[in-house]
Image (cartoon, rainbow, N blue to C red):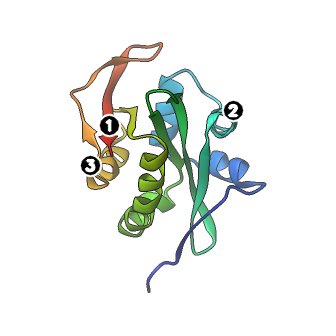
């Protein structure tokens, strides 16, 4: 049976739900950049974002994602996504449904970039399938762990 994927505005309770059920790889990644508390990481990301959404599968929140402005003058934004195991379990559906939102980000920010932990293999696979270019791993964050820079241009 096909899963029903819905992308909607972030609602009350989404942060707490995603934080309580966050994938281990996402928890490791946010800890590697100095945010050990997933509620804090999500809250800060949402506050800084110009646009953000919650992705749901059969009504259950699976991720929160958005884009943070790096330079409004240069048109550079930093996309981010933190989620639960619902995302990799329904990867194809989420990739199809996320593409229009990536295009929305690119309309606002013609250049998107961020960093992904090399250990976050499922996120790396999603980024590649979504059309992002990944660069060789290099030390990043307060612990100098290996991360890939990823980017996309309009």
- Mark 2 or 1: the one toward you: 1
Residue 31, visible in the rendered structure: yes
User: Quick check: 36 left or right of 126?
Assistant: right
Task: For the N terminus, give its image quadrant.
Answer: bottom left
Q: x, y (%) of residue 134?
A: 25, 36
Return the disc, 3 or 2, that comes first in the chain's sequence: 2
Q: Is 7 placed above or below 45 here?
A: below
Report the disc number at residue 128: 3
Report the Cα–Cα distance between label 1 and label 3: 10 Å
Q: Nearer the viewer, residue 91 or 133?
A: 133
**Count of numbered circles on the image:** 3
Residue on which disc 1 sits: 151
Residue pictured at 54% horizontal, 32% vertical: 69
Q: x, y (%) of residue 25?
A: 44, 40
Local crowd size for mark 3, using a 10 Å CA cut-off: few (<14), some (14–19), many (≥20) = few
**Location of residue 8 by image quarter:** bottom right
Q: x, y (%) of residue 30?
A: 52, 31
Report the Cα–Cα distance between label 3 and label 2: 28 Å
User: Quick check: 85 left or right of 146?
Assistant: right
- Mark 1 or 3: the one toward you: 1
Residue pictured at 53% horizontal, 53% vertical: 84
């Amino acid at each position: 049976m096909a899963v029903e994927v819905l992308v909607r505005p972030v609602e009350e309770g989404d942060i707490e739900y995603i934080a309580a059920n966050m994938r281990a790889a996402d928890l490791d990644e946010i800890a590697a950049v100095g945010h050990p508390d997933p509620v804090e990481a999500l809250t800060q990301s949402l506050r800084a974002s110009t646009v953000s959404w919650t992705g749901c599968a059969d009504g259950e929140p699976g991720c929160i994602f958005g884009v943070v402005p790096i330079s409004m003058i240069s048109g550079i934004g930093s996309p981010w996504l933190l989620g639960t195991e619902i995302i990799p379990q329904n990867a194809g559906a989420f990739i199809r449904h996320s593409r229009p939102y990536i295009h929305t980000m690119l309309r606002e920010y013609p250049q998107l970039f961020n960093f992904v932990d090399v250990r976050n293999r499922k996120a790396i696979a999603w980024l590649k399938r979504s059309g992002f270019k990944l660069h060789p791993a290099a030390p990043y964050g307060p612990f100098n762990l290996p991360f890939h820079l990823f980017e996309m241009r309009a």
